[in-house]
Image (tube, rainbow, N blue to C red):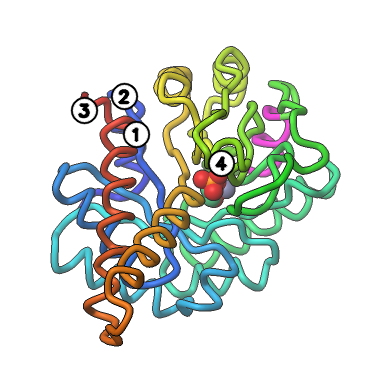
Amino acid sequence: MATLREVLQDAQRRGVAVGHFNFSDLTALRAAVAAAGELNVPVMVGVSEGERALVGVRQAATLVKSLREETGHPIFLNADHTHSLEKAEEAARAGFDEIIFDGSSMALDENVKQTSRAVEAIKSINPAIMVEGEVGYIGTSSEILTKAPEGIGALTTPEEATQFVNATRIDVLAPAVGNMHGLLQSMVRGEAQKHLDIERIGVVHAACGIFMTLHGGSGTNDQDFQRAIKAGMTIVHVNTELRLAWRRGLEAELKAHPEEVAPYKILPGAYNAIKDVVTARLRLFNFLG
Ligand code: G3H
Ligand code: ZN
């Protein structure tokens, strides 16, 4: 089985991106894995600190390991947006493939200090784990938002990116390039989309020279996604769209079967809705037409 680093190298060489999808339960995890399997493309699945609190850290790792063994498919697990050294070490010990140490709300110097410490600690547990760091603020929640959070809009500069990457020795950089976590209500209604600064993605990538992740993928314009991938994004994260699909899928089933109490009869509504979103996003990220 190829390692995550090898899969990212291959994606970069081919000018495509690896889709990353968050999960809070087995329904969403299996939906994402099934979509990737049908399209025969690698996939990353991730759990934030909140998602990990529900799923369990070691349990998430065990579930992914068992799906990987059963399907033989390249499925990789990421500890998404990890804010403390303790939680980063816990994920490293559990066997995660990637850990994102998120110091993006700190001043750059403090972010450098804490991310460097996390890189050292994670690599001392397992040098093969990819570590991602973040420079620039893109909001924090994969939720439906009434307005963009304060501070959104400032872009990561190539100088900041280079300084951060050289000082921390991270493997993957998450910059702020017009992206934002979550969906505005206008986006949920289909009246607006996120747009990215493609030129900035290109210069930041050329300057830092490492893999880059596009966070806040939900609600992004399709063309911008593909131009961002061509400009240097090798991983793309999507979460809020899946949460919305989960809720809508569940609500539709509950409404259609008001007396039903068997979860395994209701949950396929959420599974199918999530799988459809993941399939559409993976087709786009892999330029499958
Ligand atoms: O790490 C998670 C992603 O960046 C999700 O962003 O909820 O806007 O899709 P999103
Ligand atoms: Zn994110």
Mark 2 or mark 4, which has the lower sequence index?
2
Kind of residue sitting beneath label 4 = Gly
Q: Secondary structure at mark 3?
A: loop
Mark 3 in CB contact with mark 4 (< 8 angstroms): no
Dot 2 crowding, Cα within 10 Å, few <14, some 14–19, many 20+: few
Residue 139 position in % (x across, y down): 70, 45
The residue lying toward the viewer, choosing from 156 and 187, is: 187
Left or right, 282 with respect to 102, comes to: left
Kind of residue sitting beneath label 1 = Gln
Q: Mark 2 CB in 8 Å range of ligand 1?
A: no
Q: Disc 3 and disc 4: Cα gap in Å?
A: 22 Å
Mark 3 or mark 1, which has the lower sequence index?
1
Q: Secondary structure at mark 2?
A: helix
Can residue 213 be seen in this snapshot? no
Name the residue rendered at 47%, 44% in the picture.
Answer: 237
Closer mark to the observer between disc 2 and disc 3: 3
Mark 2 in CB contact with mark 3 (< 8 angstroms): no
The residue lying toward the viewer, choosing from 255 and 85, is: 255
- Magenta residues, as a range? 161-169
Residue 104 belongs to magenta span: no
